[in-house]
Amino acid sequence: YASHSLHMIIKNSLPHRYGRLPLLDLVSAFWKSDWIRATVRKKNMSGNILKWANEKGKFVRAPSSFRNWVGQQQEFPAEKDRYHLYVSLACPWAHRTLIVRKLKGLESVISLNVVDYLMGEKGWRFNAEVPGSTADTVNGFAYIRELYFMVDKDYKGRFTVPVLFDKKQKLIVNNESSEIIRMLNTEFNELCATPEQRALDLYPAALRQEIDAVNEWIYKDINNGVYRAGFATKQEAYDEAVREVFAALDRVEEILSDRRYLVGAQLTEADVRLYTTLVRFDCVYVGHFKCNKKRIVDYPNLWGYLRDLYQTEGFGDTTNRFHIEHHYQESHAQINPHRIVAIGPDIDFTLPHDRATRFSS
């Protein structure tokens, strides 16, 4: 009976031309069929973010796949209207690139498309009907995954944003946010909108060693730390990650007690990289990722620093709370199975702060 049932299940899953084959031949045809390949592919590429946890329940972020560099490679010269950014307003990594693009006055140089906040089984999609999102105006794709497969039909990695895309060669230049923001900082200087934006250097040579050192532990314990806590699948993994998050926030609170910015007396990429996590923290990470020991508003220096940055051009005007809050709570069904979006919190990032006067010397 079991053999007959298996035979019928497999037979009904294949085209009619396979109907008269013996069971063993049917099994072989079944596993080679387009149907099973598509089913397995869909399963492997689904939106299950928890599959990135290892056997100890720890979330492990996969490295970015495209690491070319505008300006430093002959095939990717810095040119106006040649490059295109694909971003999500919800994603903290993509948000970095939006901030630096704005700070450097490159909006008319590098074009932009924004995906829908909702990430489904096929990943990021384009949906011009959602406020703040756009269609794909360059390639006409429905999903970011199509862009990756156009460039590499055998691509097996994650379909992430941001993506810096070369419209002329139809190639992905880079999908690593930390490298994209450094390209935007230096490689397009001749094309910046104003002399002030051209002169702005978020990664000055004199501060690079200190910036790199700060970036390293802030990425591990805060930027990625909230994900390690939120995507943990075992208590021990969560406990380790969340403790590191708050130990690092305490460390930043101390640093900001005697200086306006993280490194030196000026705004740097270290501030950009920290901001995109801080502005999401109380809105999403406290509840959704269980990082609820303290809120950013409970840290006097961090809270003032966050308001200072939010009120700086390029930061608050690239921050979209609707996309942020709805993305995390609607997309991560493994964490929030009913996809209910919380009503709060009430946070006013425009409240006055004393950072500028306090550290004016």
Image (cartoon, rainbow, N blue to C red):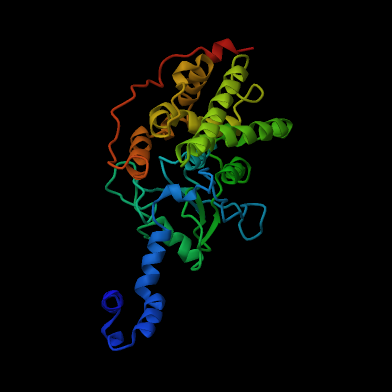
Is residue 335 visible in this depiction of the protein?
A: yes
Q: Is residue 189 left or right of residue 304?
A: right
Between 114 and 158, the one nearer to me in the picture: 158
What x and y, as percent, mark residue 280?
Answer: 43, 31
What x and y, as percent, mark residue 163?
Answer: 50, 51
Most distant residue in the bottom direction: 20
Point out the image quarter for the C terminus. top right
Point out the image quarter for the N terminus. bottom left
Between 225 and 103, the one nearer to me in the picture: 225
Q: Is residue 190 above or below residue 34?
A: above
Most distant residue in the front direction: 1
Name which residue lies at 34% across and 38% down.
329
Q: Quadrant of residue 270?
A: top right
Between 212 and 292, the one nearer to me in the picture: 292
Between 250 and 269, the one nearer to me in the picture: 250
What x and y, as percent, mark residue 109?
Answer: 50, 47
Q: Is residue 303 above or below residue 2?
A: above
Q: Quadrant of residue 273?
A: top right
What x and y, as percent, mark residue 54?
Answer: 53, 48
Q: Quadrant of residue 68?
A: bottom right
Is residue 112 visible in this depiction of the protein?
A: no
Name which residue lies at 43% across and 60% down.
44
- How many numbered circles are shown? 0
